[in-house]
Image (tube, rainbow, N blue to C red):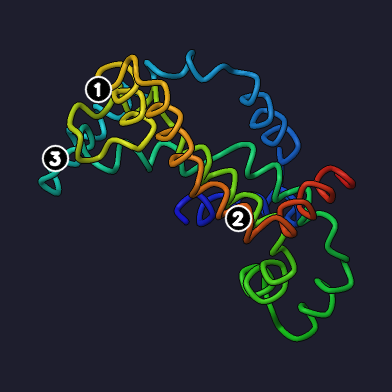
Amino acid sequence: MGQLLICIPAAYAFARMKFVGRNVLFGVMIATLMIPDVATLIPNYLTVIWFGRLSENLFGFGWINNWPALTIPFMASAFTIFLLRQFFAQIPEDLWDAARIDGAGHLRFLWSVVIPLSTAPIMTSITFGFIGSWNSLLWPLLVVQTDEWRPVAVGLTKFVNSDAPTELHLQMAAAVMMLVPILILYFFTQRQFMQGIANTGSKG
């Protein structure tokens, strides 16, 4: 949900609002998709440490070995912004003109018109975000040293390498159990997911 709170307004701004440097900023954001995740590990880790120290001084809790390190750095997703922006750009301009006649501004238009019409791409973004968080492995190993906040992928890796290194049937069973939540989510969102993928990129 935190990712949607940031990505939806950003996508709307790129799609429906005109401001100086909009295309340049959007191009720079898209270019970040070409940067490998491994190349950003150390800068992100140093940033988390700095903000963690600041948060500990101000609020009494740090980011390392806590939920902020696992969530806040990923609330802004260039792919999610691109996905939503492509769909928002397809919404007819007549709806915006009608909203302006009724006295609605950008925020009201986004909340009352754009979001209700964008169920498919929003559900697609939720699906991708959940899968990415559920399968996250390298970043949690870097920022979390306790078992309290580690995701399931870390537990599965530990189980395969340490607890049952030779029990292949147990490893397969654990892997299937890890897949079940993803399959359940996709079962309930498959129609919106396929519609969102089909519509993405049809208009820029």
Q: Nearer the viewer, mark 1 or mark 2?
A: 1
Tell me which label, 1 or 2, sits earlier in the chain: 2
**Which of 57 and 22 lies nearest the eye of the viewer?**
57
At x 68%, y 30%, the residue is 30
Secondary structure beneath dot 1 equals helix
As displayed, is residue 192 above or below residue 23? Answer: below
Residue with the mark numbered 3: 56
Determine whether the residue tagged by mark 3 lies in a helix, strand or loop. Answer: helix
> At 25% from the left edge and 28% from the top edge, which residue is drawn?
50
Q: CA distance from mark 1 to mark 3?
A: 35 Å
Q: Which quarter of the picture shows residue 82?
A: top right
User: Residue tagged by mark 2?
Assistant: 8
Q: Nearer the viewer, residue 201 or 26?
A: 201
| Mark sitting earlier along the chain (2/3) | 2
From this view, report whether residue 158 is shown above or below residue 203: above
Q: Are marks 1 and 2 in contact (CB under 8 Å)?
A: no
Q: What residue would you read off at disc 1? A: 163
Quarter of the picture holding the C terminus:
top right
Badge 3 amino acid: Glu
Mark 1 neighbour class, 10 Å CA radius: few under 14, some 14 to 19, many 20 or more: few
Disc 2 to disc 3, C-alpha distance? 30 Å
Towards the viewer: 15 or 145: 145
Q: Position of residue 43 (x, y in %)?
A: 39, 19
Q: Secondary structure at mark 2?
A: helix
